Image: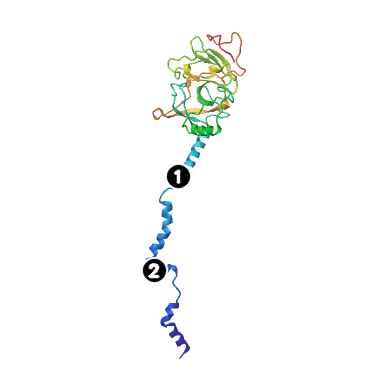
Amino acid sequence: MDTTAMNTERDRAPGADAAEPSPPASREPEAGAPARYARLRRPLRRSGGGVSWRGLLIQAVAVAAAVLLFSRFVVQPFQIPSGSMEPLLRSGDRVLVNKLAYGDDSPPRRGDVVVFDGVDSFVPGGAVEENPVSGAVRGALATLGLMDSGETEFVKRVVGVGGDRVVCCDRDGRLRVNGTPVGEGAYLYPGDVPSEVPFDIVVPPGRLWVMGDHRSDSRDSRDLLGAPGGGMVPVERVIGRVDWIGWPVGRWTSVERSEAFARVPDAPAGGHPTGPGHGVPGADPGGSRG
């Protein structure tokens, strides 16, 4: 028989199919596909079917960190601890303090409502001590506006800036700054007078004379005339300007600078003259001088 014919017959033998290579995996019967695909889908379904506690924790930490950073450098909520700034601010109000309001070229101005650190002015340096852990927790909660910020931070209105002469009161019972009477009726607590304590002071450069709007219920610069620093707040201790009342909801409003000081001139370049004949007409001669 011809050799070519023998090879052809051998290729057609019944057992030849058994030796044929298996088809690739892509040619498997369609019946096996659903099971294989299901195996591939199950891990995806497990991971995407719900949010794990770990994911929630990471998101919560990220949000808290973002809020703390925002409060630390931009706008920080503060809880008002007393009624010393009534009627504008009530005890329990939460205000939003603009920490970017001031800079080297834009210091606090008369009429601004500010929050400041009272250490070395309203509070003696080193007088307040606190456990580091509890202090850190309190500081974080205060930064979020969830509790009172503590015993060293105060909110008051700026009445005098560096170089100003602030006197109270003249014969008409008014406060005078650099010789100009200031009409405070727009923000003073109803029934209060500008001050029951007479004073006549010159604010040193880089410091502020601050007072509460509820003068009969405010511990402010007047009460510290005889203390170191004379109740004058260093400008660098100012945390920021109160720009909004954020809570309660019914009291949402912006806090504007008072126009009561719009007519007050700048302090004279050479400073204020002192001595007999240079006082403010009608001012109590028994007032303190500084």
Instruction: Give the residue at x 39% y 64%.
Output: 33
Mark 2 belongs to which amino acid? Pro
* Mark drawn on residue 29: 2
Instruction: Give the residue at x 42% y 53%.
Output: 46
Element type at mark 1? helix
* Mark drawn on residue 253: none
Q: Is residue 73 visible?
A: no
**Mark 2 vs mark 1: in front:** 1
* Display coloring: rainbow
Mark 1 belongs to which amino acid? Leu
Image location of residue 20, percent across then percent down: 45, 76
Dividing the picture into quadrants, the one containing residue 205 is top right
- Compared with 53, 86 (above or below) is above
Q: Would residue 32 be found to the left or right of residue 263 on screen? A: left
Q: Callout 2 environment at 10 Å: few (<14), some (14 to 19), or many (20+)?
A: few
> Which residue is most to the front?
131
- Compared with 201, 74 (above or below) is below
Image location of residue 116, percent across then percent down: 53, 26
Q: Is residue 41 visible?
A: yes
Image location of residue 229, percent across then percent down: 59, 20
Q: Nearer the viewer, residue 56 or 98?
A: 56
Instruction: Give the residue at x 44% y 84%.
Output: 10
> Which residue is most to the right?
270
> Which residue is most to the left?
31
> Which residue is most to the bottom?
1
Q: Nearer the viewer, residue 261 or 9?
A: 9
Mark 2 or mark 1, earlier in chain: 2
Mark 2–mark 1 CB contact (< 8 Å): no
Q: Which residue is mark 1?
A: 56
Instruction: Give the residue at x 43% y 55%.
Output: 44
